[in-house]
Amino acid sequence: MLRTLGTCYYPEHWPEDIWAEDARRMVEAGLTWVRIGEFAWSRLEPSPGDLQFEWLDRAIEVLGQAGLKVVLGTPTATPPRWMADRHPDMFAVDDQGRPRGFGSRRHYCFSHKGYFAESQRITRLFAERFGKNPHVAAWQTDNEYGCHDTIISYSEAARDGFRTWLQVQFNDDIAALNAAWGNVFWSMEYRAFDEIALPNLTVTEPNPAHVHAFRRFSSDQVVAFNRAQVEIIKDHSSAPISHNYMGRITDFDHFKTGDDLEIATWDSYPLGFLEDRVGASPEQQRAYARQGDPDFQALHHDLYRAVGKGRWWVMEQQPGPVNWAPYNPAPLSGMVRLWSWEAFAHGAEAVCYFRWRQAPFAQEQLHAGMLRPDSKDAPAMAEAMQVAAELKDTPDVQPAQAPVALMFDYDADWAWATQPQGQGLSYFGLIFDVYRALRRAGLSVDIVRPETRDFAGYKMVLVPGMMHMPDDLKQALAASQAQVIYGPRSAARDASFNIPNPLPPALPGLDVTVSRLETIRPDMPRPLKGGGAAIHYVEELEGTGEPILRTNAGEVIAMRDGHKIYCGAWLDDDGFGMLLRQLAIEAGLTVRDLPEGIRVRQTATEEFWFNHTAAPVKTEVGLLPAAGVLRRPRPAC
Amino acid sequence: MLRTLGTCYYPEHWPEDIWAEDARRMVEAGLTWVRIGEFAWSRLEPSPGDLQFEWLDRAIEVLGQAGLKVVLGTPTATPPRWMADRHPDMFAVDDQGRPRGFGSRRHYCFSHKGYFAESQRITRLFAERFGKNPHVAAWQTDNEYGCHDTIISYSEAARDGFRTWLQVQFNDDIAALNAAWGNVFWSMEYRAFDEIALPNLTVTEPNPAHVHAFRRFSSDQVVAFNRAQVEIIKDHSSAPISHNYMGRITDFDHFKTGDDLEIATWDSYPLGFLEDRVGASPEQQRAYARQGDPDFQALHHDLYRAVGKGRWWVMEQQPGPVNWAPYNPAPLSGMVRLWSWEAFAHGAEAVCYFRWRQAPFAQEQLHAGMLRPDSKDAPAMAEAMQVAAELKDTPDVQPAQAPVALMFDYDADWAWATQPQGQGLSYFGLIFDVYRALRRAGLSVDIVRPETRDFAGYKMVLVPGMMHMPDDLKQALAASQAQVIYGPRSAARDASFNIPNPLPPALPGLDVTVSRLETIRPDMPRPLKGGGAAIHYVEELEGTGEPILRTNAGEVIAMRDGHKIYCGAWLDDDGFGMLLRQLAIEAGLTVRDLPEGIRVRQTATEEFWFNHTAAPVKTEVGLLPAAGVLRRPRPAC
Amino acid sequence: MLRTLGTCYYPEHWPEDIWAEDARRMVEAGLTWVRIGEFAWSRLEPSPGDLQFEWLDRAIEVLGQAGLKVVLGTPTATPPRWMADRHPDMFAVDDQGRPRGFGSRRHYCFSHKGYFAESQRITRLFAERFGKNPHVAAWQTDNEYGCHDTIISYSEAARDGFRTWLQVQFNDDIAALNAAWGNVFWSMEYRAFDEIALPNLTVTEPNPAHVHAFRRFSSDQVVAFNRAQVEIIKDHSSAPISHNYMGRITDFDHFKTGDDLEIATWDSYPLGFLEDRVGASPEQQRAYARQGDPDFQALHHDLYRAVGKGRWWVMEQQPGPVNWAPYNPAPLSGMVRLWSWEAFAHGAEAVCYFRWRQAPFAQEQLHAGMLRPDSKDAPAMAEAMQVAAELKDTPDVQPAQAPVALMFDYDADWAWATQPQGQGLSYFGLIFDVYRALRRAGLSVDIVRPETRDFAGYKMVLVPGMMHMPDDLKQALAASQAQVIYGPRSAARDASFNIPNPLPPALPGLDVTVSRLETIRPDMPRPLKGGGAAIHYVEELEGTGEPILRTNAGEVIAMRDGHKIYCGAWLDDDGFGMLLRQLAIEAGLTVRDLPEGIRVRQTATEEFWFNHTAAPVKTEVGLLPAAGVLRRPRPAC
């Protein structure tokens, strides 16, 4: 296939007489895709029922005639002001009970039935009008579900929806719910489903089973909201449907929305992320301030490849400084190109730059684009054009299954958030630390979803921190030929957030029991024999498994039985690096010890090298300049 | 008397068919006491009036038949869900005006008359049914009054109660209140009691007299709530009545609730406290992460000995990692035994471990017990059994009056909280620093209540930070033969939170006047001549008293007239250590300079040595192993 | 003219029989002025309509007869409790929607029409009764507008007022508003003015144009509130009218309130400010803990000289420790005198100490006065008396235009607050850094208001950070003979908070364009060639201007065309120092490199030297003792 580039465009922001010139310049720049429409509701329906779609017809025509393919977004992330008059209680409510009102975006509660119907109505109007438009080559539902913490809502609509959802989950048996949640503790038992409140504003922490169920419900509401749009679009269009996920949003199960979509896309803002959500140390933040974290984007690429069942894009690629992070520096020269190629190396079908022209008004007026507000080229333009030229002149990237699988389970993320047991501990953080260790060893990784049962082709499978593991997953992993690495905290809870008996992890074929667990202060790492340290989260292990990792004090940190390994602690970079490199070698993998900031991604035939540092780095394949990209044939293993 | 052990048990959490085995193992472990019932309301009255006490009858019978003595708790800390339907406004309200609802525990406002009556009703049902039960050997009212900041409530019920309380305090004379509070300042005068609001949500800080009065009222509401239960129980039972106080809860006057009870108990979680509320430096937190602060528990032991008028227990002793601190490490091996013996050395009648078996469900599923969730012994079990054996094999501890008295005044704590005048300054913090200095000097200390007027037997009496000192206390101290050490901030306010005239402290027999005060940044200690420094809070002293402590810059920090001393500053560890050791020697006491982490407690006949560090320490009585306990005859003075 | 001293007095706080003695002592201390009345409403009108002004008549008489001049304050900052019954919705509402109620002060919303009328009513009563009183020599409106964040209110009254205000601004044309704000972005368009809500409680940040307009509206409400009082007073009195502004309150345009007043006064609390609002580093906070920041007060002096159109006072001068900062140390001996003389050196007509006698009750009981609560002299008294004697014995200060003008624009401060683009960045902070660099170079500075168009007499004019610059200001500056220094961020937005096209700054006669901007982490300064660094905020510059400052990496930081300079970055102390000293020399100014903590202020004939450090400092004019003041003839340039 042909890897392609694109951009995000807002015809409603500009005079109609410059659309054609904009389109011409997009094509000239080598772009294929243009995403439009997703925030335009107030221009399409300025008053309820007053439909004014003609300008959008014309915009699509102008873009299409210029040779561009349109991705059309449903505008449901920004209902107009009049919607709040029709549905005054449509807003999400924060955990302190405050409605999150009109005046920016994403001002709706996924559980609000009235707005749900409105979102179907406008989607139907879009699908009917544009479903057969030859220029509309793909769809996008809504925009960045979950951005600005908008999944979890403590509204009355959510409360009512949650009660109904629980009623279904527990077959209308309130005693079953009380038993499953252990509500006898602290006399929290309910007599009926309509006695159940949302788990906020309690005196001290609410029941974790209650919280976790509410997280599952909240995720399901997003899935239903998205599915409703998809079903309508599919009635009128055969173009593929996508959603643009936002980085490090884990409040809903992307795999489940992904099941209803053809393509997963995500919005990649490496510098904003580094400042705002990677959680890097100040040293890392300084070192990568203008390049972004070397692994954060790659992890998302691999995640969305899984969410998209192989088909995925970057829908919004940062082209320059953004407006929303604590500090907003400019990317180092070359990074826009590097980010683009990194996406392709991980299998992206397309990379679209956000946005075409920087808006001189409103919230994102300091968010760079490919053009400056005065329509001159911004620095990103030249790099995008270089990528376009390179795409044209070089063979297509050939994706391939990676040798290493890392399971990612949104439900586990909610479980850790519900019960971190230590300040700042998160499932995502653990996954990211494991992923980084694999990447520093030069390994290419597939993220796999928790429903995966067939691990054929993988030499190594990692399942850290997956707090609830269904029995058939345990069995499938036990039966796998791969090296399997579990823990910490894997299989620590049953499906209802209780500690199982026998005690966790109760893995077939690996006799290990977590008899106790500790969380430890970040300034008290426990050094390991051989280097590195256990940090954050440390389990005490019993069993007949062979101890393979100990602290200096002799505590057993990891045990194995053949090629099944349980690791009972969160390790620091050196610890995970040491353990995983050793196990990878045993699994028959070629490992490297890559220099700081250098990363490698292998495809079926090639190997891409990326220098994420701000200086040239000497590597085994030669000197890589700052922000450098090297593409070469994959060496024989 | 025989010092005893016990545990906390929740028969309602477990199948009835394991109760007998549990009871058998408790007895086998050497336990005497089992506390039950305090969270069981929803099982005893699943719906209003639907009483189901039979299971509790049977549980008591099983436990009693096994040889255990039952402490029965009234379940008023966890009213069932239906209570909220009967009394929708029963919840405490936080300072931002948000009701603190159902879903965890302590979800009631002490001022709510409807819930007050319900608490009396259920207590009466308990008393009537179990008052004569031979196995019920003691009672507990409610559970941990004040935990989760539940004393101070900004509800309408509290507002109405406060108005009535003020009306009584001021004999229905609003002018008297205006005068007492200085309401002419900023035109805050009221025309009637029902104009008075609660002191929250004001534009800037409210009148400290207003705040402080509200604190006194709030404390009185707890005393009344507790007394109502006590009166009912006493009508039906002659067993002693206790309450289990929580560490570092100072929002109500424990001495006043204690006046209505036979026994004071407290809940001791050394590791959770160190992380959560001791206020130790990061270095201290690292050094004692698995042992707890060396003085924090001892201070509470001495405090509750006073609250209990000599009769006190540890009702909940941490047995392993807990679930509620920022980080939750496991105790160092030996610490559960050390903590137990430390309590006995301070005079505890009993130590009960919380809880028997770790619950696999709900909020405390990661709170260790004596048993693991799978019923195997957790590490605490062996240490508890060792203590049980030691208790059996050694002579009883003989408590004795200590040579040093330290006055603790809850009212002063509220006064400091109302007007800290420097960030982070608290009365408890000052008391704790003084207490630690005394302990590091090897001194045993009695905490004495503010109503104490007879100081016979004490060689040294300390009254730091007691912002309001009644005249008869001043006279009693002046008349005492003991070395008396006042200040800083002692007698700084009159009963209505005004600065008295003549200026403070106005002590009989010690001519010293605080002419000005400063609070200083923590990074600007003022070094003292001779070592140590004044920190936090520094008063300028005038008068004819003899200066006995100065800063390097020459400021007078402490003055004396004979054996009465006023110290006008908060001192650091070295400063308090130097000053108090010197004064103790003058008072005829034997002082030591104990090694880091070593503490000594003297009884009538013995001396207990404790090593709170994680390594062996060489002491004058030999090498003490990590977590070591040494018991030896008290040397002649 | 004669420079004078005064104090703030609350006759209603003290028994009437000590008023005369107090007045006598004030005169004896050398005081001229006594401010009274501003918090006395509840004593003047204890119930609605029950006027009791006689005591105030008598107080004024006693003070006046003693020889003092009275400044009479309207009491509108502290409406009595009964006002809340008449106007239950009169309170300001915070950004979380919580009313800020009765119980302290400033408990009103400027937009509340009912309270607005009440404020006029009480002002009229004051003006009618005291307008001709010969002892009332000046007036004060209200007290410290904006203290405790009371300008920005999210009340319904404010919402309604804002809608009306916008309707006027946009000539009742909602389409014009939508276009000006760019509301097409995120479908934020309104159909009518009554659809507009206040910009709080939105899901993510609201439109900056919306926020900024609300800031302008909020400022206008203060101006209107103040003007209403002024108009009434002027009907009855010819005495000058003042308002006492509080330090670093920028939420309303002081120049605009100042236009309605004869005198600007401000309340100077150097130690409280250093702890609470200067934003100094911990090192600076330690070094100046007992002296205050060396430039913070001076900046305010220069600002209020401009606000007062030359007539300004210090209405409240800190005399000792205050009660409201995080830490409250005592001033170093000599600082009260230094602060007084510094004010005079900057042109103050009067300095009044707050307050006469420390109140033993209510919120400010730990705020020092000239007298202690027991009426003995507090330390400030001797220093004030020394200043009084010095004033009597020395020639009057002769103010003069400074050679350097620094423009201060409240609107720009709101713009930066609306869109900081980097954590912690503020316009005030930038202005303060520039001002400090000028002062360290020994330069005297005039603050000039944004409406200034005549720059005659200035050799150097600085206009940093003024985000919106009207065209006629640009023209006036271009035409000026002065060295003019713009940027960073000058002229970056049009009047509606949009990025202009051509891109900023678009200055006549200086070809420079900001093509991109970055904000950078505070730990990532960009070193400049020649020393110092660019910090916080860095613009990329294009154009034909001559580059005069570059980073080590070669980025152009400043450009010039003749004597017009654009600086595209916030610089650190060394950077601004180097650049501004060099430019000042070119402008023909004499510059110094003053020792740490030494500051100089020149008048027409003299030069005042101040040592703000706690140790003697050697200077070119000799050794200055700690807290020392030196006055000498101005040297020839």
Image (tube, coloured by chain):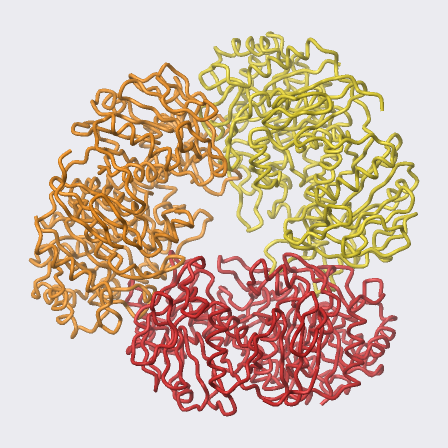
Chain colours: A red, B orange, C yellow
Q: How many marks?
A: 0
User: What residue is rendered at 17% in x and 73% in y?
Assistant: B16
Give the left or right position of residue A633, taking residue B609 as reference. right
User: What residue is rendered at 75% in x and 42% in y?
Assistant: C576
In this view, the residue in front, B245 or A193, is: B245
Rendering coords of residue A423 (x, y %): 44, 60
User: What residue is rendered at 79% in x and 34% in y?
Assistant: C448
Is residue C566 visible from the viewing direction of this image?
A: yes
Give the left or right position of residue B391, taking residue A73 as reference. left
In this view, the residue in front, B288 or A75, is: B288
Rendering coords of residue C499 (x, y %): 80, 56
Rendering coords of residue B494 (x, y %): 36, 25
Rendered position, A389 above or below B9: below
In this view, the residue in front, A439 or A179, is: A439
Give the left or right position of residue C539, taking residue A542 as reference. right
Rendered position, A164 above or below C76: below
User: What residue is rendered at 70% in x and 16% in y?
Assistant: C3
Q: The C terminus of chain B lies in which quarter of the figure?
A: top left
Rendering coords of residue C336 (x, y %): 60, 22
In this view, the residue in front, C254 or B233, is: C254
Rendered position, A427 above or below C442: below
Is residue C211 visible from the viewing direction of this image?
A: no
Rendered position, B99 above or below A396: above
Give the left or right position of residue C241, taking residue B2 as reference. right
